[in-house]
Image: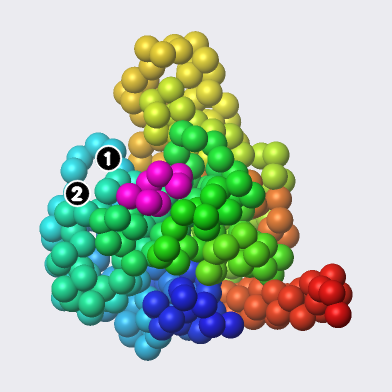
Amino acid sequence: MKTRITELFGIQHPIIQGGMHYVGFAEMAAAVSNAGGLGLITGLTQKTPELLANEIRRCREMTDKPFGVNLTFLPTVSSPDYPGYIRAILDGGVKAVETAGNNPQKWLPMLHEAGVKVIHKCTSVRHSLKAQSIGCDAVSVDGFECGGHPGEDDIPNFILLPRAADELKIPFVASGGMADGRSLVAALALGAEGMNMGTRFIATKEAPVHQNVKDAIVAASELDTRLVMRPLRNTERVLRNAAVDRLLEKEKALGASIKFEDIIDEVAGVYPKIMTTGDMEAGAWSCGMVAGLIHDIPTVQELIDRIMAEAEAIISQRLARFAAS
Ligand SMILES: Cc1cc2nc3c(=O)[nH]c(=O)nc-3n(C[C@H](O)[C@H](O)[C@H](O)COP(=O)(O)O)c2cc1C
């Protein structure tokens, strides 16, 4: 299946694995790229630019296919060494970068000069148009369903994607709620050129996270996520657990006066405890509503092959039946 996204990144299938904190290690990115998609190492999970450089080297040992790096510009407790991370990306010969969280304009000239293609993740048409105007090569349009940070507009993909299609000239992928061949065909029908998946890729054999995380996603339904940190305008969709319930109680009790320090126990330093140790009550961790569509833990290759076979069958059989002959 050729789309503007497969052409842009030189990949076989129009499927991207979104950056995921403490999931997007070299093993994850390489597995996705080896299966014909675009795997992404999560830059900030590596604590220093040197560690990112090493992770890029490790990934290159595991795949000769294109892979990328996610760089997230989010409010973090201490400001990361972004110039150093960019240098590691350029020196590592990486040709695809997913930016997210804030405007990447400052970094585009350096990246483009080195031939890096930049896909910016946006949760609104407004931000997608901005990304286009500053010269991003593509956008990942992330609907309200998504795991992680859906922004503050709450527009689901059934509306957001066709709105993006009406406005954008650069190609975009659908992100948030994507799980299978049906998702891919729907995304294409709504104007996207492929799809980005987060939560679905965690429930795979190669995902380098604790088995408890994969089991929690398989056990969860579409009803089991919650939005936290909305009063801080840093909304995050997470899997419900005892810590999330506690956090929401605090949000209710403190109202508009809540500060980040009030919820630090439930949100800071949680990812290694969840993803590495498998302590599923350690705090709030990102997970999409799409958990309701995830019922197994295949290899990444099985997952991507299944998605592509299903998508092609839907297009050539089910949808063909509806076309006027
Ligand atoms: C556990 C987890 C961690 C994530 N961490 C990041 C991150 O560090 N940076 C980022 O840009 N997106 C992050 N995301 C968002 C994903 O890249 C992707 O946009 C999102 O998961 C898509 O929605 P889906 O989960 O419904 O597929 C994360 C998502 C999950 C589930």
Camera-side residue of 31 and 8: 8
Residue pictured at 46% horizontal, 27% vertical: 230
Where residue 183 sits in the image (x, y, percent)? Answer: 66, 62
Residue 152 seen in this snapshot: yes
Residue 151 lies within the magenta run: no
Q: Residues within 10 Å of mark 2 (few under 14, many from 20)?
A: some
Q: Quadrant of residue 109?
A: bottom left
- Of the numbered discs in the image, which one, if any, rests on residue 76? 1
Q: Are marks 1 and 2 in contact (CB under 8 Å)?
A: yes
Specify the amino acid type for callout 1: Thr
Camera-side residue of 213 and 256: 256
- Report the side of 107 relative to 260 (left or right): left
Vertically, is 94 above or below 268? below
Residue pictured at 53% horizontal, 23% vertical: 248
Quadrant containing the N terminus is: bottom right
The magenta region covers 124-130
Question: Distance between the Cα atoms at labels 1 and 2?
Answer: 8 Å
Specify the amino acid type for callout 2: Pro
Residue pictured at 71% horizontal, 65% vertical: 182
- Report the side of 237 relative to 320 (left or right): left
Camera-side residue of 12 and 211: 12
Residue pictured at 70% horizontal, 74% vertical: 311
Q: Residue furthest front?
A: 325
Q: Quadrant of residue 222?
A: top right
Q: Secondary structure at mark 1?
A: loop
- Of the numbered discs in the image, which one, if any, rests on residue 80? 2
